[in-house]
Amino acid sequence: MNTPRATRAAAQLRPDAARVVARLFLPGEEPHLNHSRAAEIVTRVMAIDEAQVELSVARLLETFASRHHNYEQVLTSHASVVASHVEDPTQLSPARTLLLGATFTAEYAVEGAAVCNPSAVLHPDQTSVGEGEVRVAISVRGIGEGHLSSIGFRSAIAGPGTQWRFAEPTYPISPGVVTSAPWHRNHLRAVLADHGDVDELAQTVVRLLPTRFEDADLDRVLSQVNPHLLSRPGATATVQLIRRLVASSYTVAFDAATLLEQRILMPSVAEESNGMEDARFTRFLSDDGTVQFRATYTAYDGHRIAPRVLTSPDLRVFRAHRLAGPAARNKGMALFPRLVGGRHLALCRSDGESTSVTSSGDGLVWTEPHLVQQPTATWETLQVGNCGAPIETQAGWLVLTHGVGAMRTYSIGAVLLDLDDPTVLLGRLGAPVLEPEPDEQDGYVPNVVYSCGGIVHDGVLWIPYGIGDSRIGIAHVALDAVLDAFV
């Protein structure tokens, strides 16, 4: 049967330059620079007449307070970063503290360059939706100055039928409050093994840690390690690596008063300092009926990528963690929405060009992948991969895929995997359901349509997709038509 073609909806998302956050700015410590100018700048701020300070702060509050969540609190926090340069802290009046903080603050437009690569899940709030409608939560990749990527959110209403509308934007956006998160000892052992850095010191530290531990436990264990191990060549590098890995786990919590579309996940640790890319969300249903939102994403530090996972009970509190194991070594993992055979499953592309299935006992450490799909068609000669979490249907696991062909053109197709054994490929579409149309060729990355996850509602498969890594479109196709077309 011929492959059905998806129909474009009129709704689109374009970059919104008004979505800004107030970030700490330390002059002299921009990329490729390493000389802080903080001391000199603090001295200048401290020398300003108090009356002028108060006038300046009044203007700042009038101009920026409505653009940022808890603006004064943000400025006070940033002032505390450089307060050690203040010779006489008694001179730091409330107004001067705010001015000092503002001097070391800069606005960052999270979508200043682009918004792309969406994934869709059922929104946790289904109040006030009409008959035939469903509220959808959409994660997006925002790209700002310096090609820094973050994970943002939008809301939309799908239905009735093939209607789709995005919620109006709400301001200001908020980066939430970041705190440390605990580790499991076996997880740390697996991540160290991925690094190839399990020397005697690392083995000793891991062995002494409790099964579940936090930063304070690591400090205590390091204080107990035999001094001879700490004095060996390479010991300093091992300790630094362990500390960096443990610090890479964190929790982000947002004020309950914020709406989903006001929440933004910004890079918070070293391994994602150059971006958080392409989150693939799924609504995970546990065997006991508990719902949890989970997403894989790619962290980038400017040199290396690191597959990571987000977990959240409500899309308000998120925990970020590193993934490990043979399958967690490339971009584009996507999690299944439930356990299969008592284990977590995920799609991956560990060889860089083919789709495989991997499993895990805890959702963090992933086994050697099993190949299920290789590039064969003309529109996927360079590589194939998933376009988000598998969608469960009566016929099997429906997996949206991307193929990359001539002229590095990205198109979207699909495969069908067996429900009980997803390593079994039941079928694949003979052609894309979505490929760049003439008015979609141009963009930050030309000739690309790309999704990080679709959703089915009332027999309609909705595919939110990035266009040229610049903007987001919405397409739809009848689910039955796709399932009938597999060969």
Image: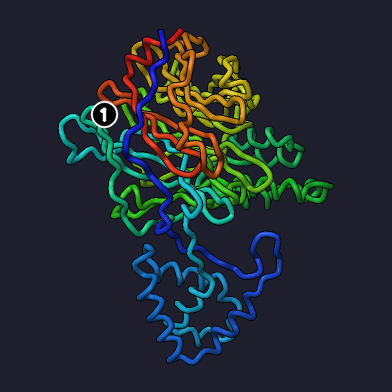
Q: Is residue 94 visible?
A: no
Tell me the residue that label 1 is attached to.
162
Residue at 50%, 10% in the rendered image: 425
Judge left or right: residue 299 versus residue 171.
right
State the residue in front, 193 or 266.
266
Name which residue lies at 39% across and 21% down. 5
Q: Is the residue marked by circle 1 packed among few (<14), some (14-19), or many (20+) residues within 10 Å?
A: some
Q: Quadrant of residue 281?
A: top left
Q: How is the image coloured?
A: rainbow
Q: Position of residue 293 (x, y in %)?
A: 39, 35
Estimate the x, y position of residue 268 in percent, counting from the top left: 53, 52
Q: Residue 456: x percent and y percent? A: 32, 25
Direction right: furthest residue: 233
Residue lying at 51% horizontally and 69% vertically, measured from the top left:
105
Residue 268 visible in the shown view: yes
Q: Is residue 189 above or below residue 107?
A: above
Residue drawn 79% across the image and 46% down it: 229
| Identity, as a three-letter code, of the amino acid under mark 1 | Thr
- Image side of residue 471 versus residue 160, left or right: right
> Which secondary structure, mark 1?
loop
Q: Is residue 74 left or right of residue 187?
A: left
